[in-house]
Image (spheres, grey):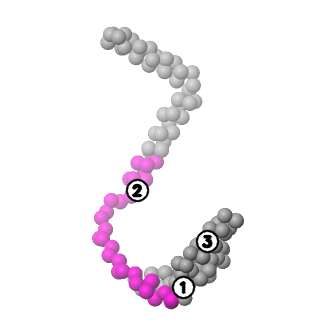
Amino acid sequence: MSAERKLRQFRLLLWKNFLIQKRKVVTTIFEIGLPAFFALILIFIRLRVSGEMKDKQVWDPCLGWQRIPYQIKATRLAFSPQNNVTQKIMEHVLRSEIGLKGIIFFTYCIKIVIKLLIYTYNCIQYI
C-alpha cells in the first residue's frame, strides 16, 4: 500500500471515531471527564502533602520471643478447614513421629494465639 492510501484510511478511521463519539455525548463526557476529575483529585492531594524529609527511625531488636515459656512450643498442630480429607492428612502427620503430641482444629487454638499476642505486645512495650 502506498503512503497516500494509508493516510486516507487513517483519516477515515478518525472521522468514523468522531461520528461515533458525537452520537454518544454522555459517554464521551464520562470518558474524558472522569479521568480528568480523578487526576485533579490526585493533584489536590499532592498539593496538600508537605514534602519534608524526616530522620531515619532506628528500632531496637525485639527479643520478646526469648521470653516465651516452653509450654507454647509447637507440640500440637492446628489446621483448617475441618473435613474428612484434612482430618485424614493430619492423622497421618501425627503418626509420622515428628514430635507432635496432638492435632487440633484451628478454632481450638485461640488461647495459644492470645498468649502469643500478649507476648508480642510485651515485646513492643520495651521498644
Where is 59 relative to 43, above or below? below
| Element on which disc 1 rests | helix
Residue on which disc 2 sits? 48
Start-end of magenta stretch: 41-70
- Provide the residue designation for mark 3: 92
Residue underneath mark 1: 72
Alpha carbon of mark 1 to alpha carbon of mark 2: how far? 49 Å
Instruction: Identify which amino acid the numbered label 2 is placed on.
Output: Arg
Q: Is residue 112 visible?
A: no
What residue is rendered at 32% in x and 10% in y? 2
24 above or below 67?
above
Per the image, is 116 magenta? no
Neighbourhood count class around disc 2 (C-alpha, 10 Å): few under 14, some 14–19, many 20 upward: few
Which element is circle 3 on?
Answer: helix
Confirm or deny contact between disc 3 and disc 1 (CB under 8 A). Answer: no
Residue density around tag 1, few if under 14, some if 14–19, many if 20 or more, within 10 Å: few
Alpha carbon separation for disc pair 2 and 3 = 59 Å
Which corner quadrant holds the N terminus? top left
Check the picture and name the quadrant holding the C terminus. Answer: bottom left
Verify whether residue 59 appears in magenta: yes
Q: Which of the marked residues, 2 or 3, is nearer the chain's N terminus?
A: 2
